[in-house]
Image (tube, coloured by chain):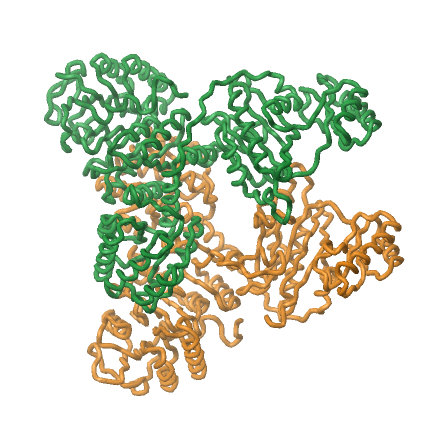
Chain colours: A green, B orange
Amino acid sequence: MLQPSQRPGQGLAPFFEAQGIAIVGASDDPTKIGGRPVSMLIKYGYAGPVYPINPKGGTIQGLSAYPSVLATPTAPDLAILAVPAGATIAAVRECGERGVKAAIVLSSGFTEAGTEGAALQTELVAIAREYGMRVLGPNCLGAVNVADKLIGSFSIALEENMPPVGQVGIVSQSGNVGSYTMQSVARRGLGVSRFIATGNEADVDVADGIAALAEDDGTRIILCCMETCRHADRLIEALRIARERGKLVIVLKIGSTAEGQAAAASHTGALTSSDAVFDAVFRRQGVLRVRSVEALIDIGHAASLLMPNRLPQTNGVTLVAASGGFGIMMADAMSEAGLQLPALADSTKSRIREAVPTASTGNPVDASAQMSARPDILLKMLTALLEDPAESTLVLLLSLSLYNKRLRGIYLEALTQVRASHPDRLLMVISQGPAEAVEQINALGIPVFPSIDAAASGLAGLVRLGQLAHAPIHIPTRSAAEPVDPAVFRSEFHAKRALAAVGIDVPSEAIVTSADDAVRAAESTGYPVVLKIVSEDIAHKTEVGGVALHLHDAEAVRTAYANILDSVGRHAPDARIEGILVAPMVQGGTELIAGVSQDAVFGPVVMVGMGGIYAEILKDVALQAAPVSEDEAADMIRSLKMFPLLDGARGQAKADIAAAARTVARLSEYAYRHRDDIAEIDMNPILVRPQGQGTIVLDALMIPVSASAR
Amino acid sequence: MLQPSQRPGQGLAPFFEAQGIAIVGASDDPTKIGGRPVSMLIKYGYAGPVYPINPKGGTIQGLSAYPSVLATPTAPDLAILAVPAGATIAAVRECGERGVKAAIVLSSGFTEAGTEGAALQTELVAIAREYGMRVLGPNCLGAVNVADKLIGSFSIALEENMPPVGQVGIVSQSGNVGSYTMQSVARRGLGVSRFIATGNEADVDVADGIAALAEDDGTRIILCCMETCRHADRLIEALRIARERGKLVIVLKIGSTAEGQAAAASHTGALTSSDAVFDAVFRRQGVLRVRSVEALIDIGHAASLLMPNRLPQTNGVTLVAASGGFGIMMADAMSEAGLQLPALADSTKSRIREAVPTASTGNPVDASAQMSARPDILLKMLTALLEDPAESTLVLLLSLSLYNKRLRGIYLEALTQVRASHPDRLLMVISQGPAEAVEQINALGIPVFPSIDAAASGLAGLVRLGQLAHAPIHIPTRSAAEPVDPAVFRSEFHAKRALAAVGIDVPSEAIVTSADDAVRAAESTGYPVVLKIVSEDIAHKTEVGGVALHLHDAEAVRTAYANILDSVGRHAPDARIEGILVAPMVQGGTELIAGVSQDAVFGPVVMVGMGGIYAEILKDVALQAAPVSEDEAADMIRSLKMFPLLDGARGQAKADIAAAARTVARLSEYAYRHRDDIAEIDMNPILVRPQGQGTIVLDALMIPVSASAR
């Protein structure tokens, strides 16, 4: 959890802005891990002093080497450690003594290598903390500040060229994936601000990286690749900082296939997947999540070309191709990605036909090969399209036209002119290349996607980014945990009483210990009633004959009371019996299930889904980290596939969704408050009645955090 | 429908094998539509005579021109028409007179241009038929035989180079999409056999193209792009021919987003989408359907490298990357694509660790950067992996390594050796380039995919192709249509009687016209019973008080009989009443819905889905062109999302799926037999009882083909 003293990103400046760098384990061989940073710092012209550290001293790659960091002429801000794992301990202590502010441990052989390595890693961090040093890694690819040529990395991606300086920051746990992203971005001519790869995350984690880049004025877009999250609160806080600073965050969260879910005692537990919680939390924190490294790069690239004022404001798109077939493919892909294809205005249509008589002016526009006959024809058509009142994004498919020199000239000329005359309108191109033509189009501020599918999911992502830029910032709740009365774990009666105490409607119920009291309770409740055995030792009441339904009068209640005690006595002779529950027989309404379980990353997570067997088979549930507001809960309910059942499908009455949302929100607050004690809650079923008539929770189950898990 | 005299593909030989070609409307300008074929036939060296036809005569591009095809020294087999639409009529007649066997009409201005053009097109085809000529187009990009340099096309894709000669045939309705596919395939160094673009399909259609390529010995893989299908029987027959000849067919069917479904009178009609029927028919005919032109090219390319003996035999995949992060991404994508990741054998693991001590030997294998330190290390590791007993496909991710010269050399050396030592094992690479390195790897017979997602869906497609290569060939039913007794349209009673006559179980029911008869019928059926009004004028029986349920004795039946007549008399005084239906009150079992509707392309289509509101909200239905076998029907039922409900979910009894399949199969045969008369059938609900206890169809509705639609 977030340490109050340590805001994400705090103390990371030396990784990017160090005045002086020592390389511990420096090598004269520029291809070795200890040689590469030295070589690249020299080659690209880092301005501060570079101190190779090597016990042999002498000269390394033309620089004076020092036997220890203690011997350097000035105290370097940053040390890069490229010595075997065992040797890092002494090295990091010397760094501390020398006043080094931050260390990058490139070496492997720590937690990832087994228990011995894990012990080394613990020691390493302890020493760093002692000296107030931040540690990046171990087993990481380090950090880079492109503008300052500060290269605390051995990435092969930097061997031949530095990326151009730009606005894209890269944070990655995996060095390889981060490096691939940096190199791919650079190969497209797109500029990078800073790069940080966190590796084992003994100290600095992805949240630190995001926050540090969010606070860097040179960074506008943060591309992040993460595998695991060890401190959800820090991640959420870092994302909040990024929102506050107006930085766009695009995350590739990998490892989404559940390797097998932990056995769970409740329905909620079985229906909650950690990956789906990541989805929900990213959405809430204004992050665009993507599903492939190509999408990370494509969308990051497009966003950087469109910022600050050309992110799409609507999800409308107008499609143009020189071919009907490609037009249909574009329409299919864009519709599937959730984009709308508005019809063109009549005036736009006539302007297009004036320019290209053979064009068909639906959306997609089949502009026929004639559109590229001359630059002025193309320009006329594009101008008409960009001036269409729908103001949708214009997507132009060029298939392989840019490989043809004549066509390439025509396209570039028309695009250049139209970009100049309509600088604020959003225009995208689909083309596979060649690369230099794509770069020329990019240079006009026009994103180019390599395929129809990439363009469709890319534009949908950009629309989402445009919406996120205007969405309110979510400030997470940070109230302290409160203990719960352990009685709630004893039976459904006590669980429901606790829920009733926070304003969740449950049936008026009584526990009785005599047939007379049962009849009195039934009469006060009103017939028909149900009787259920109450025992903390009996999980499945029906199986021991512990339930009687549809009891319409006193005699039926008396008979049922006796039968239940008799049957339970025979089937579960050792069970501690607290009494018998008398409850009204409630029917009608639509069944929901809601609950809370503990996610390994995000703590208490609230779930709502359709009741009964359908939730189980269809996994038709919505999740969010607790607590949720009533608005959030209503959104969760509306996102269910079976939501039409609540919304008046087939002429049924609309259900009381507001009440259902209130119930879920209150459940989530309750669970969050008691998060240290309650592991899981099921409310199953919740009957949701017609609008204005509320909900009623018919059964509830609470499971304590086990002694071992605490 | 298939004309018996005209097998798909028949008469297409001249498009590809013409001895002599006339170009009507030939131009001296090699960039014009009428100039390009002349120029390319000369440039690439077509062996037969080329006759430019131009009223001015003289010389065209160095060849003697003739004023008419009637004046050519020999009769050309093929004519290419590049004259304005209006002039094609006279030209095609002259071709007929001259004994030309086939004509390619490149010109536009026909059906796509309005009614006048449509009339021209009809006339064009009529004249061609008169002379026994086949016509390709009009408004098409023509046909190409790569080996013979026979170019009946003006495709810009051929302007600079011919594709290499190879085994890939391309059939496309859209000239642009076909041309893009040909050019993309060629840019990868992959060979093409023949190309045909069908345009308006006045005569030759995609089915002809598929069949013609299937019968070409030089073609092994057919890549097809289609938008519409005018003759389902021809398409199915062409696909059958391809299966029979052992040719793989990969289809990109575009236009999958329903633009809005025709209003339908039955549930079945509302739940049937033509695109889903295409899916089902392609599956049945052994075709791999892909969703993007990139997948068409990627998978076509990979399949051509793996044929004939290395298509995957299992859906197992072993993943290798030099990075944990990429390994996780690969695992996510492959699992999502339905592939399995078997664990490596212990012996394989130790061999890997021996070669690369830093490797982690799960699946995915994180082989660390060490794997590419030396070719012998990589070779040792790859050999161990290819000799693993699981025999899964090995997928190696190279991220950007091939851009690094040293690494590229190492990879190529190891891959070359391992390919030579294990020629039959399936190995794939993921890499973005550079292009020449990818071509070198392809030349080893190793498919290279540009991204993890492309590799995952590509491998899944190859697995499917491998399965299809061994699946039985589906021979469609071709029995004649029989008339139906129009009584089936009168009421549910008659509809169910007709279904009962083909062996579908329905309740034993009677129509009565007196209360006494109602009681007698109820007593013979057994109580409880239901009474329902029978009138062809009353569609919604409940709304007019025409239904009574749960009738337990004679008195209840009498009362209900009177009440129904009274209520219907008041609510629908003009309805013709046939009587009152007495049926047993059947309950229990799981509800299915099944039905048949008429698809615009495939005719009668059978649908089965979960009953009730769920089918509607979830669109949880399976479709197939009628008739279906019991096995096919069982597969359809098993494919439902809610199938677990029938299969004993939550400890319920397993439903009688065999009986349900039998019911669906019989329905489909019945509907197919009466396809000319019955437009739609609903069986809703079908109660499916526990195993061995059969099904019972509680309600049925049949809708006639309307007089206007016939």
How many labels, in total? 0
> Which residue is at the front of the view, B108 or B67?
B108
Q: Which image quarter holds the C terminus of chain B?
A: bottom right
> Which residue is at the front of the view, A536 or B405?
A536
Task: Tell me: residue A373, above or below residue B588.
Answer: below
Residue B373 coordinates in the image, percent (x, y): 26, 34
Residue B662 coordinates in the image, percent (x, y): 67, 55
Task: Tell me: residue B37, above or below residue B697.
Answer: below
> Which residue is at the front of the view, B242 or A66?
A66
Residue B498 position by quadrant: bottom right
Residue A103 seen in this snapshot: yes
Residue B417 seen in this snapshot: no
Q: Is B540 left, or right, of B465 in this rendering?
A: right
> Which residue is at the front of the view, B149 or B683?
B683
Residue B701 position by quadrant: bottom right
Residue for point 24% across, 21% down? A83
Residue B179 position by quadrant: bottom left
Q: Is A260 left, or right, of A158 in this rendering?
A: right
Residue A230 coordinates in the image, percent (x, y): 40, 25
Task: Tell me: residue B650, above or below residue A322.
Answer: above
Q: Is A706 left, or right, of B324 in this rendering?
A: right
Q: Is B46 left, or right, of A457 in this rendering?
A: left
Task: Tell me: residue A527, above or below residue A1.
Answer: below
Residue for point 63% across, 33% down? A695
Residue B527 coordinates in the image, percent (x, y): 84, 49
